[in-house]
Amino acid sequence: MYDSQLVFKALEKPAPYGPDLDLSKYKIEEPGVEETREVDPSLLKATSRVGLDASSLAYAQRNEQALATAMAKLLEKYGVIVLPTKEALLRKPFARELSWKLVDPTKDKYTAFAYLYGGEVGYFIYVPPGVKVPVPIYTCLSITSNNVVQTAHNIVYVDEGAEAHLVTGCAIPHGVKDGVHIGISEFYIAKNAKLTFTMLHAWAEGLHVRPRTVVKVEEGGEYINYYVTYSPVASIQTYPVVYLGRNARAYLASIIASSNKGIYDIGSKAVLEQPGAGVENVSRVVARDESESYARAEIEALESDTKGHIECLGLLLSPKAVISSIPIITSRKQGALLSHEAAIGLIADEEIDYLMSRGFTEEEAKAVLVRGFMSIDAPLPPSIKKQVDYILDMVAKYAVG
């Protein structure tokens, strides 16, 4: 347990990046948990925006209401536990041991708010030792009311030698115009285990989004994170931190399509704690209208015999859009090998002219070029890659207007 006075004091602590928000202007609904076999229409509209089939969801959340679905029960045949976090904390001592151990609630006002007022809504997932889950685990968090704060506290533990693919979609149906999403995620990847985590965001012009994620990867473990956001948003600020043990690996990829006057401050940090640890941090940013995009990437090597590489590429589609690439590499031991590259450019006229000469319209030509720019050779399983490709096609069409 944390000192409550310190947590309350943190409610006044702004995050180091992103616009500061006055959370008192928003309301929070009473948290709850309910069993359901059918997802309501508003949530169906939200899931379709991130390419998810509502019937396959293992966990769904509407505002502060956690929905335990039938799909979660089907995963039990593999020994996988999927529960609303609140329920897991009541029923599983193991869950209580993991809760708020990686994310410090005094970090900033958003973590403090989730700790004090969130009601522990979110998902808890446990994958037993040696189990390689053959199907993706789908979850969805949706805001369906205006002027609310949605909190989620997600805990995932992939036990020794196990493997899982988690896909989380965060979205709202059309018609919701403002609100705040605060997502707290604590991911544990045990020795020689692997977690592929794909996050798909589709918010709205008045939404402020504040995910807070920490990942712990033990010896020989692997973490693959693929993040995509393509919708208008008032602001989004996230800076997940991944800690890598001996011979642990991480691949961190983000695709950002910014628009309107939104502020997109997105990045990640990897800490190479033990020899043999390695990370590749890749981002693609496409900016249009008057949006501001900040692509942050950081690698810190605490030991020798570690490797890390950062690649940040940006593409400006509007004269009023802004992209800032901010790579940081820090080595605290001789023998670490770290590198970074960053570039920001625009679509070449000759490339558009070439495609138009082949029968494409100007908009189609731009979409093709943007789609090619966003392609990342991420190590995703085929079922997830197919879904990500579908989303990226949507992103390319949206990015060019």
Image (spheres, rainbow, N blue to C red):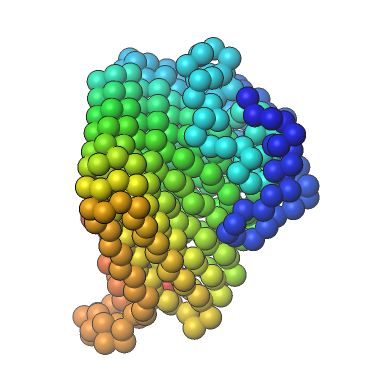
For this view, does 307 lie left or right of residue 262?
left
The percent position of residue 182, horizontal first and vertical second, equals 60, 43
Residue 178 visible (yes or no): no
Q: Residue at x 53, y 37 (%)?
A: 103
State the image coordinates of residue 203 (x, y, percent, origin top left).
55, 53
Quadrant of the image occupied by residue 143: top right
Quarter of the figure with residue 11: top right
Q: Residue at x 54, y 12 (%)?
A: 91
- In x, y percent, where is residue 114? 64, 37
Q: Looking at the image, can residue 331 be seen?
A: yes
- Nearer to me, 84 or 349: 84
Q: Nearer the viewer, residue 22 or 65?
A: 22
What number of labels is visible?
A: 0
Left or right: where 355 falls relative to 207: left
Image spot of residue 80 (x, y percent): 37, 20
Q: Residue at x 43, y 25 (%)?
A: 125
**In this rendering, is residue 250 above or below 395?**
above
Work out which quarter of the rendered image holds the N terminus and state it: top right
Q: Is residue 253 above or below residue 29?
A: below
Answer with the quarter of the image where residue 296 lies. Answer: bottom left
Please tell me which residue is depicted at 35% across the width and 52% down the height of the picture: 332
Q: Is residue 170 left or right of residue 396?
A: right
The residue at the far front in this view is 334
Compared to residue 5, the image places residue 88 above or below, namely above
